[in-house]
Every structure is written in structure tokens, then in C-alpha cells.
Image (cartoon, rainbow, N blue to C red):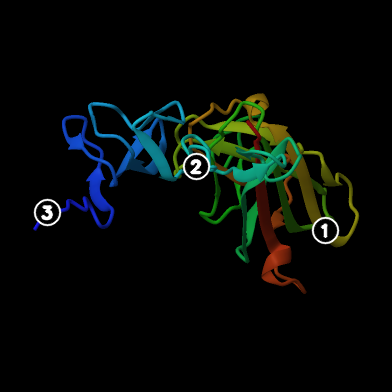
Amino acid sequence: MATIDLGKIKQVFRGTYNNATAYVPDDLVTFTDGQITSTYICTTASTGNNPSSGGTAHANWAFIAKGVADPIPSQSGQAGKVLKTDGTSLSFGAGFEGTHYLAYANQYQHGSTVTVNGSGLTDGSAADGHRDCILLNNGLYHTVTPGHADDIIVVSCSANVYSNWGGSGSYWGLGFMSATNTAFSANRNVFYLMGQHAQGNGGAGGDEYRNTTTTQQFDVSDIGMSVGTTYYIRHIGQVHSPNNNVAFGQTNGNNQRSRNTCWLHHYKKQT
């Protein structure tokens, strides 16, 4: 009886295409053309012929399942950004149309009272405990690492302040300073002072409490901050020279938040 060769009775999956393998019709392979992986069927015996090039199948091959490029672009360097579409393609970009985004928000508050008398203290000095650097933060601080010279910080502080003006009277103010260590001993920079005369009454004015507040906005480059360096920021007080006590964070009739509070928002520039 004559022998009849029926050939293959089903397709054979041969795995990932190998340039050295001899393929025969109905062999199936996978092959990555550029960055797109597809499945192909051999239509004519073939050795050393890539199934496709530039998205076009070789004459000895045909597509079974044609792959598509990954629509999501590389995430490298895209920290803090979101995936966006223009209707036809995808890209990473800002999550909103503003020039800056809020990267850090922090506040600290405490109920400690700091009472100082300006008489005898060194004037015009940024050293701790001198008239322009009365420590009010109780060891608390904010942390800022600029990502761009045009990053913005908005910082605010308030303190309930008491002075008995029945005598010679007193003046006081608030401010902010930065440093590159939490002990505030490295690269100290007092970048804002209300001034010793910002609040108060130099003459006899009675027994009075006042909530003293300041809020300021800065580009980080304007206050000497370098991109990539971590800074620590705290609020401080100032006091003038008259021989009369000034109590920052005074307790009478006030809760902890009203006694000493400082908050900071760091807005990073969109790049």
C-alpha cells in the first residue's frame, strides 16, 4: 500500500525565534522586532531570516498575533509627576497646570514660656539667647531640601506675648532662621526679623497680652539655600533693651496652639 505523507497535522510552537534553527511551515515562534514582541507562523521553510523587520513580516513568515508598543513611557526621572494624555499619546507631566506643587507641609506647637529681659543682652547678634535670637521653638523645627532655585517656602509663626508695661515698657518681634544641622550651629542664617521694635509700648501702658504673628514667603535662592542641601528652620524672637520682662508663649487664658505655633509649606517648582 502506498504511503501518503500528510505533513504536520497541527501547528508546532518552537518558542523564541533562533536565527540558527531551520524552521518549516506551520512552526510558530515569538520574536521581538525593536521593542515589540509578536507571534509568527512559518509559511515557507526558512533559516536565518528574522520573522520581521521594522514591523513588516519577512516573506517566509506571517503574523499570528502582532504586538504593540508599551504605551507607558519610561518612568526614569519622573518622580513626583503623573501620567497624562493628549488624546493620542501618553507622557509624564505635572498633575496640574500650576508652576509649583506642595511638596512638604509641617507645623509645630508647644506651650513652653520663654521670659527674657533685654537689658544687658548683646544687641544686633544672631547668637542664641541674644536680643535678635531668643529661642522659642522648644527644640522643634521644619526640614526643607530645595529641588530648584525657584522653590518657594511660606513660613509663619505666632506667640502669645506678655509684658507688664506699668514700668518702662518693652518692645519685641519674631523671626526665622535656618541651619544645616538640627543643633542650628552649622551655616546659621537669620533670614527674617520683624525687629526688636515691631510690637510693644515703650512707655507705661498697663498690663497687656498680645498675640504676635508674622507670615512670610521666600524663593529659596533669596535666603541663601542651595539646591539639594537639607536645611532646618525654626522661629525665634527679638527683644529690645528696656529693663522689663517679655514673656513669649505666656499661659494666661490660652491653649498650647496660641502660645507658640510655627508652620511651613515648601512648594517645589515644576520642571
The residue shown at (74%, 54%) is 158
**CB under 8 Å between callouts 2 and 1?**
no
Whether 154 is drawn above or below 125: the answer is: below
In this rendering, the label closer to the viewer, 2 or 1: 2
Which amino acid type is marked by label 1? Arg
**CB under 8 Å between callouts 3 and 1?**
no
201, 97: nearer the viewer: 97
Tell me if I can see residue 86 in this picture: yes
Q: Which residue is mark 1?
A: 210
Whether 70 is drawn above or below 257: the answer is: above
Q: Earlier in the sequence, mark 3 or mark 2?
A: 3
Q: Which residue is mark 3?
A: 3
Q: Earlier in the sequence, mark 3 or mark 1?
A: 3
Q: In the visual, does 259 lie left or right of 51?
A: right
* Element class at badge 1: strand
Badge 2 local density, few (<14 within 10 Å), some, or many (20+)? few
Badge 3 local density, few (<14 within 10 Å), some, or many (20+)? few
The residue shown at (41%, 34%) is 35
Q: In the visual, does 241 lie left or right of 234?
A: right
x then y, percent, for residue 267: 67, 41
Q: Earlier in the sequence, mark 2 or mark 1?
A: 2
Which residue is at the far front?
1
**Whole-Å distance between the Cαs marked 3 and 2?**
45 Å
* Element class at badge 2: loop
In this rendering, the label closer to the viewer, 3 or 1: 3
x then y, percent, for residue 102: 66, 47
- Residue 92 lies in what quarter of the image? top right
Q: Which residue is mark 2?
A: 68
Which amino acid type is marked by label 3? Thr
